[in-house]
Structures are given as C-alpha cells and as structure tokens.
Amino acid sequence: MNNEKISVALFGFGCVGQGLYDVLNHSEVLQANIARIGVKDPKKQRSVDASLITYDKDDILNRQDLDVVVEMITDTDEAYAIAKTAMNNGMNVVSASKKMLATYFAELFKVQEDTGKALIYEGAAGGSIPIIRTLEEYYDNELLGSLRGILNGTTNYILTRMELENKDYGDVLKDAQASGFAEADPWLDVAGFDTMYKTILLSVHAFGVVLKPEDVLTLGIQNISFDDIRYAREKGLRIKLIGSAAKSADKFRVYVMPRFISKEDELFNILYEYNAIEVEGAFSCKQSFVGKGAGSHPTGSAVLSDISALTYNYKYAYKKLNKLRALNGGRIAGNELLDKKFTTRVYIRFGDKEELRDLDIQHVVEEYRSPKVNFIIADVGFESLYKHKGNKDSKLFICEC
Ligand code: HSE
C-alpha cells in the first residue's frame, strides 16, 4: 500500500461511520477513496450518495480492489464474521467494535497470524486518545505496573451532570444517547461492560494478557442515586467508573468498578464525555492521557488515524503478548493469570440488609442506617462481588474506596 490513494470500504454508517466520513473529507494528507458503504437497514435515509450503499456484505468482501475494510457495526457476531472474512480475503481491517474485539480476541489474533493481515483498532478504546499505539510502540519495552482510567464517555457524562448540575440519571442518559455517546444498548455503558471490553484490550497491549469478558469483574453505575453523590461530595470526593489492570506478583488484577476519587487524583477533573488513562511504568513512572472518549468526530478521528497507519503497512507487533506466550509454553496467557483472591474496601448502599447476604463481608469499617438511606463501608472478598456483575435484580450501589 502507498500514500497515493487508498481504497476503503466501510461497514456501518452510524455515529462513528458518519464521523469518519466527515473527518476523511476534511483530511488534507490522507487520500482515501470510499468505494462502498455496507449497511443493514434499507429504510434508513443516508446522507451519502446512494450508489455507495450496499446491503450485501459480499459486495464488499468479495472485491479484489480494496485496501482496507473499516468495520463499525454493533452486531458482535456479524462484526467478527466481517473482520475474519476480510482478512482471509486479503484485506487489512480497522475496527471500532470493542465488544467484538474483546469477545473474539484470541480467534482474531490467530487470523492475523495465519493471514499476515493487519487488524488495528485505536478507536475501540479511549475514543480520540491514541492509547493503543502508545502502549504498542512507546511502552513496548517498559515494565508497566498498572493502568487505570475513565474509559466510558457516557457514564462520565452522567456522573458529571448528576454531580455538577443536579440532573436526574435517566434524563442525562437520554442526553448522552442523543449526543451519540451511548451504545445502541446503553446497558453496556451503565453496567460497566463497555469499560470492561476496553480494559481487556488495553491489558493485551500493556501486559500481553488476553482475558475473557466473562471472567472480568464488572460493576457499573446503574444503581447510583443522589445519596451516593451527596456522600462523595461531603467527603470532597467524586465517583468515577474506573477500568483498572495492575500487576500483582505474577498475576493481574483486572476489573471495572465505580471508585471514589480524591481531589489530588488526576482523574478528579476529567468531566463529561472526556476519558483519561493513567499508565504507571517502572522507569517512566506515572503518565496520563486525556481526550474525548466518545462521540462521532473524536472516534472518527481515531479510525482515520488507523487507516492512515495502514498506508505505511502498520500492524501491531504484540510484543508483550508474544513474550508472555513464550513464557507460557506457547499458549496465549489468559484467565489463569487473573488474581481474584484478595480483599477490597467498598462502600455499599443497600435497602434491606438481606441484599448483602451473598457478599463475603470480612470487616465492617463503618455502618450508617436511616429511614432513607443505608450504607456500609467494609472489606469484602473480591470474588463475592461477581454475583452483582450485570445482575439486573441487584439494587446495590458498590463503590471502591
Ligand atoms: N459508548 C461509548 C462511550 C462510546 O460512552 O464511551 C465510545 O466507545
């Protein structure tokens, strides 16, 4: 591939697809020709020339003249099939589908190895923040100890507006949807899953470990109330949804949970749809990366950067993954390296004490009961928190202290 004019086909023309289309049309350096746009719904009006649109994915996947397929659709299995087929048919792929990438990471890694084709996905984590290539290139030889961040624009937007504008959770979620920040299924945002998929991808590039979505503890903000916001405010804290991955002896602690953040913390002032990622290395020490984490143009700009990288034959080297694999007898290191055996201090707001029965509460540090609100601060066995992952019956709000 060279820098003259590359031929690109898009799958999906939703929020990110349209953002990419705009930023591509404004790019002064990258010369790309959009050859085709594959979409699903024939009834939807599109803002592009109808001759570009196709409803048959094979119109794109069977072409011989394409350099890059850009996949930005919400159906996870369909996105996986597209990415796999495109690589098998000799095309490089750019994807922004974090759920698909995290769910099928090991399979897609193998397709890349078998075909020699590139699959790159800067837009899948941190929106406009160039974090994946930074982990790949800049930190490729650094001994990273931990990584944590605000990785979901929708939840940060909700938390910010609840706290600073006293806005109702449901109303702000609607605004986040209208602004194009939220997923088609916003449960993925509020219950922490979107943050978890991104944390899995960042863990691959930071540490070389490939975790499965079902194994990573994921707690969200779906049960948050003004009582929790008020409690945090009184203590000079803010609540943020944090994805974190840290080395712990020869294992890794990787999870997603709301957390109280103090004023001294870099993440305290990350507001609205902004994301931030803090990386800590043995020699580089702490470094933070901040930028818009959601929205059509910020994510479109990350996708554009990937398309541009393919013009100079860029692909991820997966140095850390391959190093860990070599130490692991040739097998990709995964869930066996996940440390779940520790205790963590959490704030738990509950209605009835019965709701706490399945938690391994080892030590209660503080307990508050009133007719309106009950909470405890306690040291809890980490593994017992999994019962509340994606659990629509659970009414607890759990926040790490
Ligand atoms: N729903 C996602 C978010 C979109 O709110 O961060 C960007 O990945």
Image (spheres, rainbow, N blue to C red):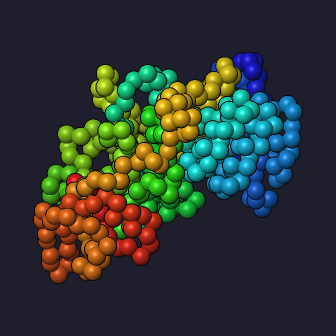
Q: Is residue 143 visible?
A: yes
Q: Residue at x 50, y 23 (%)?
A: 137
| Quarter that holds the C terminus | bottom left
Residue 397 or residue 127, whichever sits in front: 397
- The image position of residue 323, as x and y in percent, is 50, 28
Residue 298 or residue 48, whichever sits in front: 298
Q: Residue at x 36, y 38 (%)?
A: 250
Q: Residue at x 31, y 66 (%)?
A: 397
Q: Residue at x 31, y 38 (%)?
A: 249
Instruction: Tally the numbered discs.
Output: 0
Q: Is residue 34 visible?
A: no
Residue 389 or residue 397, whichever sits in front: 389
Viewed as shown, does residue 142 lie left or right of 81? left
The quadrant holding residue 301 is top right
The quadrant holding residue 91 is top right
Classify 61 as above or below 389. above
Viewed as shown, does residue 274 lie left or right of 237? right
Residue 75 or residue 385, whichever sits in front: 385
Outermost front residue: 329
- The image position of residue 185, as x and y in percent, is 55, 62
Classify 240 as above or below 276. below
| Quarter that holds the N terminus | top right
- The image position of residue 353, as x and y in percent, is 24, 79
- The image position of residue 235, as x and y in percent, is 14, 55
